[in-house]
């Protein structure tokens, strides 16, 4: 069998070009996949932010209604969010004496919740 070296040399660059084209196409596909994944993450984050904003707005609306009712009973309600626990804390205050009548949930319960969260974090070594 007689092999024509010139024909083999002519074919080799074609194979390299196909290989390069294939690599370029693979890179394009990978970049598109990453872009799609990033878009999905961005959309999920945007939806979560919308949900949180709506939840805050609803909570504020309910709290305004509760504050109106409490004024009729000579009580003031003060509410805040415990950022560590992401939990609403309500204080019932006597309007005449400015004395705190009750904290809901109680300080002891808040401390217990915080401690439990710490222990869970130590056990699982991640935040839940």
Image: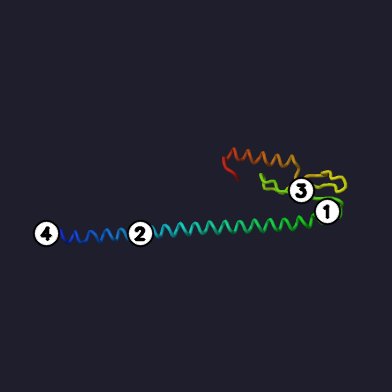
Which residue lies at the image location 55% right of the left edge and 59% below the top edge?
Answer: 43
Horizontal and vertical percent for residue 57?
Answer: 70, 58
Disc number for residue 70: 1
Mark 2 vs mark 3, CA separation in Å:
60 Å
Q: Earlier in the sequence, mark 3 or mark 1?
A: 1
Mark 2 vs mark 4: give the one in front: 2
Q: Please report contact status of discs 2 and 3: CB closer than 8 Å, yes or no.
A: no
Instruction: For mark 3, give the secondary structure.
Output: strand
Disc number for residue 90: 3
Instruction: For mark 4, give the secondary structure.
Output: loop
Instruction: For mark 1, give the secondary structure.
Output: helix
Mark 1 vs mark 4, CA separation in Å:
103 Å
Disc number for residue 24: 2
Q: Please report contact status of discs 3 and 1: CB closer than 8 Å, yes or no.
A: no
Which residue lies at the image location 59% right of the left edge and 38% below the top edge?
Answer: 123
Disc number for residue 122: none
Drawn side of residue 94 relative to residue 52, left or right: right
Q: Residues within 10 Å of mark 4 (few under 14, many from 20)?
A: few
Which residue lies at the image location 77% right of the left edge and 56% below the top edge?
Answer: 64
What is the quadrant of residue 23 in the picture?
bottom left
The quadrant of the picture occupied by the C terminus is top right
Q: Earlier in the sequence, mark 2 or mark 4?
A: 4
Q: Residues within 10 Å of mark 3 (few under 14, many from 20)?
A: some
What is the quadrant of residue 32 in the picture?
bottom left
Mark 1 vs mark 2, CA separation in Å:
68 Å
Drawn side of residue 101 relative to residue 52, left or right: right
Q: Is residue 117 above or below residue 19?
A: above
Q: Is residue 65 above or below residue 120?
A: below
């Amino acid at each position: 069998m007689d092999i024509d070296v010139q024909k083999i040399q002519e074919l080799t660059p074609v194979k390299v070009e196909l290989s390069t084209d294939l690599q370029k196409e693979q890179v394009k596909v990978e970049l598109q996949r990453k872009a799609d994944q990033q878009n999905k993450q961005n959309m999920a984050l945007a939806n979560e932010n919308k949900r949180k904003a709506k939840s805050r707005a609803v909570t504020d609306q309910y709290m305004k209604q509760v504050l109106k009712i409490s004024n009729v009973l000579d009580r003031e309600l003060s509410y805040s969010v415990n950022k560590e626990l992401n939990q609403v804390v309500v204080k019932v205050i006597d309007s005449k004496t400015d004395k705190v009548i009750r904290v809901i949930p109680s300080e002891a319960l808040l401390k217990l919740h915080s401690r439990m969260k710490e222990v869970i974090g130590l056990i699982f070594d991640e935040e839940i």
